Amino acid sequence: MADRTFNLDVITPEKVVYSNEVEAIIVHGTDGYLGILPQHAPLITTLEPGPLDITESDEKKITFSLNRGFMEVRENKVVILIDTVEKQ
């Protein structure tokens, strides 16, 4: 299962909003939408306001609405640092 998932943390200045193993995410980057899967190449990018679509390891789908922020992808871990976030 570990090769099919990666760790995702969504963090605001106040708290960790989400932390779990996921199969995939889609997020709105500066140059368009980005799809992140396990074993993705290292990446640091800015994020634009828009949806964060998460597919959890049990195929459950979750969507958050993000404000501007940053995303780092490295070693099968994704960290999203964001000002504000709402679960949809």
Image (cartoon, rainbow, N blue to C red):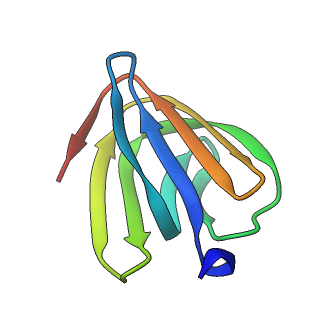
Q: Is residue 80 left or right of residue 53?
A: right
Q: Looking at the picture, tell me which residue is in the foreground, 12 or 67.
A: 12
Q: Identify the residue at horizontal 33%, vertical 24% (top origin).
A: 15
Residue 52 in the image: above or below residue 9: below
Q: Identify the residue at horizontal 39%, vertical 16% (top origin).
A: 13
Residue farthest to the right, as pictured = 41
Q: Identify the residue at horizontal 52%, vertical 38% (top origin).
A: 80
Quarter of the N terminus within the rendering: bottom right
Place residue 63 in its image quadrant. Answer: bottom left
Q: Is residue 43 left or right of residue 22?
A: right
Q: Identify the residue at horizontal 40%, vertical 64% (top origin).
A: 54
What number of labels is visible?
A: 0
Residue 31: image location, x then y, percent: 64, 47
Residue 62: image location, x then y, percent: 28, 64
Residue 88: image location, x then y, percent: 17, 53
Q: Is residue 13 left or right of residue 7?
A: left
Q: Looking at the picture, tell me which residue is in the foreground, 84 or 2.
A: 2
Residue 35 in the image: above or below residue 86: below
Residue 35 in the image: above or below residue 70: below
Residue 58: image location, x then y, percent: 36, 82
Residue farthest to the top, as pictured = 13
Residue farthest to the left, as pictured = 88
Q: Looking at the picture, tell me which residue is in the foreground, 70 or 18.
A: 18
